[in-house]
Image (cartoon, grey):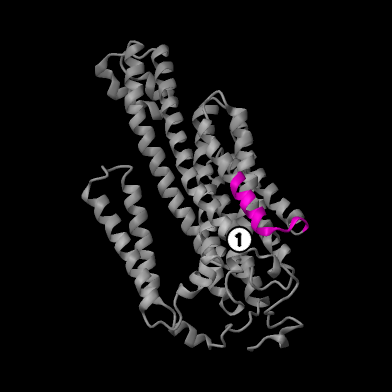
Amino acid sequence: MARRSHRLSRFVYGERVKALLTRTDMGVYFAVLVGPVAGGFAAQRAEAWRWIFYAPAIAVFFSFLGLYFFYHPPKHPRGLPTSQAFKELDYAGATLFIAAATLILVGIVYTTTLPSNDPKVIGTLVSGFVALVAFALWETFAPLKQPLTPTHVFTRDKGRELTAPFIVGFVVTMFYYAVNIIYPTQVGVFFTDATTDFKYAIVLGLPGNIGLCFGAFLLTVLGHRIGHWKWTLTASVTIMVVFGALLALGNPERKGMMIAFVFLCQVGFGWAQYLSIAFIQFGVPQHELGISGGLAGVARFAGGAVAISVYQTILTNVQSSKAAELVPRAVTAAGLSADAVPAFLAALPLGATALAKVPGVTNEIIAAGGAAFQQAYVVGLRTTALSSLSFGIVAIIACCFCNDIGPKMNNKIEVFLENDENADKNKYH
C-alpha cells in the first residue's frame, strides 16, 4: 500500500519532469543505504531487528496522515464520478491476471523441490499460462468500459510508445533482483564465513547500493543537460546488462572484481530504472496517465516477482545438483568413507559445529568439502548471471524501438491538484 501511494505521488507534483525522475525517491535512497547497515546491527540484538519494520511503519503512518489532510487529487481524467469508476473497474481481468501470475510463479518455484515433470509443476504452469491467455483474450474482446490494459495503448505507433518501454522497465527490475541474489550470495559464500566480523560483511554489501543511488543522482544532474533520452536509456541499460552478466566471473579469489562490477551494474540500473518509468508514463495521452502509471508499477513489481522466482530457482537447482556431484568426490578423495558422505552433505550447510560431528571427519576433509561446496556455488551463480543476459539483450533491443521522449520533457503541467493555485485550469472539478 505504501509503494502504491508512492506511485500515485508521481502524478501530482507541479514540478518539472526532471525533478520527478528521482526527487520523490529520496526516502528510497535513504532506505537503500541505511537499511542494510541498520539491519546488520539490529540482527546482533535479540529483539532490535523488529525496529527495521517498526520504523518504516511509523513513517508510513505519518505519510498517510499527510495524504489524508493535504492531498486533494484532481478528478477522474475522463470526468467519471468515483462511484461509477469503482463499478466499472475490470474485476474479472484483475482476478485472471492475479491467478495467472501466482500459478506461473508457484510452478517455477516448485522446480526447486520437485522434478520438472512432476504433475504439480506441470499442472500449475499449464493452468497459469491458460489463465494468462484468458486474461489477454478478455482484455481484447470483452466489452469493458474500463479495461485494465486497453489494447490500443500497447499498439500505439506499433508498440513504440508503450510496449517497448514496458519491456525495458520489466527487465530492468529483473536485473535489480538478479544482482541482489547473486552478489549477496557471493559475499556470504565466497568472501565471508562464520568467523567474519559482521561489520565487514555490511561494508561488502554497500557497493551495489551506493552505485544505485549514484546512478539515480547522475540522472537527476545530467539527464536534461545530456538530453537524447532514448540513447541514454539504451546506454544505461547496456551498462547494467554487461556488468550484471560479468558477475558470472565471480569466485573466492575475485572479490575486488565483483565489487567493481556490482557497483557499475547498479549505476546503470539507477539511471535506467527511473528513466524507464518516465518512458512508460509518457507512453499514453494525458487522460490515460493512470493506466500508464499502473503499468509502470506492474513492470517493476511483476518483473521483481518473476526475477526472484526464476533466478532463485536456477541458482538452487544448479548449485544443488553440482554440489551433489562435486562434494562426495572431494571428501572421499580426502579420506572420508562413502558411508559418511550423506551425513557430511547434510551437515555442510549447517556450519563447522555440525561438520565436526560427522564420523571420521578431519580438518582436511572439511576443507576439501568446503572448497567443493564453493565451487558448486561458482557454477550456480555463473549460470544465474548468464541467464540474466538473455533478458538483458531483449531489453537493449526494446530500447532501440522506443520513441524518444524529448519533446515531452518540458515545463507544461497538464493536471493540477484541486488545492493548487492553478486548479481552475483542470477540465473536471
Q: x, y percentage for residue 66? A: 66, 71
Image quadrant occupied by the C terminus: bottom right
For residue 245, above or below residue 16: above
Image side of residue 92 versus residue 252, left or right = left
Question: Residue at 48% of width from left, 55% of height from top?
Answer: 303
Looking at this view, is 53 or 376 the one in front? 376
For residue 244, above or below residue 359: below
Please tell me whether the stretch drawn in magenta is mainly helix, strand or loop.
helix
Looking at this view, is 276 or 404 the one in front? 404
Q: Give the range drawn in magenta.
A: 225-239
Q: What element carries label 1?
A: helix
Q: x, y percentage for residue 170? A: 51, 57
Q: x, y percentage for residue 90? A: 41, 77
Q: Quadrant of residue 343?
A: top left
Question: Residue at 56% of width from left, 67% of height from top?
Answer: 161
* Residue neighbourhood size for the residue with mark 1, other residues' Cα within 10 Å, grouped as few (<14), some (14–19), many (≥20): few
Q: Decide whether residue 237 is among the magenta residues.
A: yes
